[in-house]
């Protein structure tokens, strides 16, 4: 335990590789990490088990899997099984975009951060090798931080919270190299939007493509099990 | 149906008097209203039934009661039964404050607004006769609107959303007079934080005090049933 272990952070952990790396980063900074995962009606629920493994392996102080169904809302291939997950790169924002997802997740993280007295909320957002989701951009994160520091009793009392996005400007390959350096076991993570019944990644969705290309560029073997060789 | 009925709004409806008035206001503007209520682990779950009655009576186009437990987080007398609801006015922000509640509610409203193509999100926040909650202030609402217009695909494509707070600067008595003018049936609403088993309001909590004082100042009979005469 480092001297900083009294510093607390809330970390959004999806079960994918970015958030695993962010958690390792926050742990390396010496934060006691309160990990938050959402069971939101996503088709790739297998990521919930990955999130549990990741949080446990990186020594989370606490880990909550919050049930918050967003599937009633529709509007996304990740929560509406009638909308297929694209297997080719899309023009513009892909249909895997989930309306307001990061705003919802960050707002619940904000509440928990206030209750825990955490100064930081970590999120694995990236605006380089990413799918173009609007709520992953730096200007969005700055606006959320500004909101957060008006929203709570903690803010009124002068206890500010920061939204930390250490991966924002990193290439996927650099994220993976950083994770390896920090001891992340990527075999515990799950990236695919539509794994098969055996849990194997499809190799074709946006998330599989970004992952596989990142591992290839990093020169690191991808421990994921693919149903088909990934389209990189 | 007015000519504006093609205009859609998402309206946060708690079951209390402010949000009922806001819904009537949005309907009077001619909006098709998509009402949203949260079953968040509040001790006064009776307000969920009130929300259903209010939405139906004012002609909501749709009404969803979203289950999103916030009680695991703690930190509020409304979600933690071990923290008593104060029966005297408090100094500063009272313990009935729920961490990040409006941020969570507005973020889900934002997602639904995007899916529905709604241009407005209505919320019954008030910064005059209120409990001092930080996420009811105008500067908070402005920051949320700014965030909202960075967060979504709709925003990226130029379809802006507005956060509408028509009650923000009104006295409680004026809210009630406005609601009466708009045909709100306040007997359908429920304001108390700790109603008894028969559904009668306590008359002592902050919410009961604000309500009862508002009706008295407005010169309108309060149709609520109180277990004890309200402390005004």
Image (spheres, coloured by chain):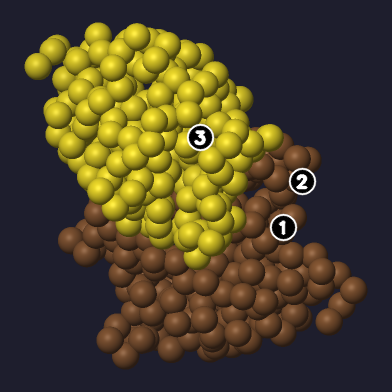
Chain colours: A yellow, B brown
- Label 1 belongs to which residue? B117
Q: Judge from the rendering whether residue A21 lies leftward or rightward of residue A212; answer left or right.
A: left
Question: Marks 1 and 3, Cα distance to the nearest angstrom?
Answer: 26 Å
Rendered view: B116 above or below A230: below
- Label 2 belongs to which residue? B159
The residue that appears at 47% across and 36% down in the rendered structure is: A204
Chain name for mark 2: B
Mark 1 near mark 3, Cβ–Cβ under 8 Å?
no
Taking the image as drawn, is residue B229 in sight? no
Task: Depth check: give the residue in front, B4 or A189.
Answer: A189
Chain name for mark 1: B
Of pointers 1 and 2, the one earlier in the residue sequence:
1
- Label 3 belongs to which residue? A206
Mark 1 near mark 2, Cβ–Cβ under 8 Å?
yes
| Quarter of the image with the N terminus of chain B in it | bottom right
Question: Marks 2 and 3, Cα distance to the nearest angstrom?
Answer: 26 Å
Query: Are labels 1 and 3 on one chain?
Result: no
Question: Marks 1 and 2, Cα distance to the nearest angstrom?
Answer: 8 Å
> Is the residue marked by circle 3 packed among few (<14), some (14-19), or many (20+) residues within 10 Å?
many
């Amino acid at each position: 335990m480092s001297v900083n272990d009294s510093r607390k952070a809330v970390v959004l952990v999806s079960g994918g590789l970015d958030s695993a790396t962010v958690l390792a980063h926050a742990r390396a900074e010496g934060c006691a990490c309160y990990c938050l995962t959402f069971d939101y009606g996503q088709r790739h629920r297998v990521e919930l088990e990955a999130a549990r493994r990741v949080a446990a392996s990186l020594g989370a102080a606490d880990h909550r899997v919050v049930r918050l169904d967003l599937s009633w809302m529709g509007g996304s291939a990740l929560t509406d099984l009638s909308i297929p997950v694209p297997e080719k790169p899309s023009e513009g924002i892909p249909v895997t975009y989930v309306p307001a997802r990061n705003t919802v997740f960050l707002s619940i993280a904000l509440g928990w951060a206030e209750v825990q007295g955490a100064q930081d909320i970590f999120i694995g957002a990236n605006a380089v090798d990413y799918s173009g989701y609007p709520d992953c951009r730096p200007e969005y994160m700055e606006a959320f931080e500004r909101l957060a520091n008006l929203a709570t009793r903690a803010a009124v009392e002068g206890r500010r919270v920061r939204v930390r996005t250490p991966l924002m400007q990193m290439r996927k390959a650099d994220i993976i190299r950083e994770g390896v350096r920090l001891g992340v076991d990527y075999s515990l993570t799950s990236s695919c939007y539509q794994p098969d019944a055996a849990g194997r990644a499809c190799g074709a969705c946006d998330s599989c493509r970004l992952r596989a290309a990142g591992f290839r560029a990093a020169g690191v073997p991808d421990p994921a099990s693919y149903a088909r060789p990934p389209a990189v």
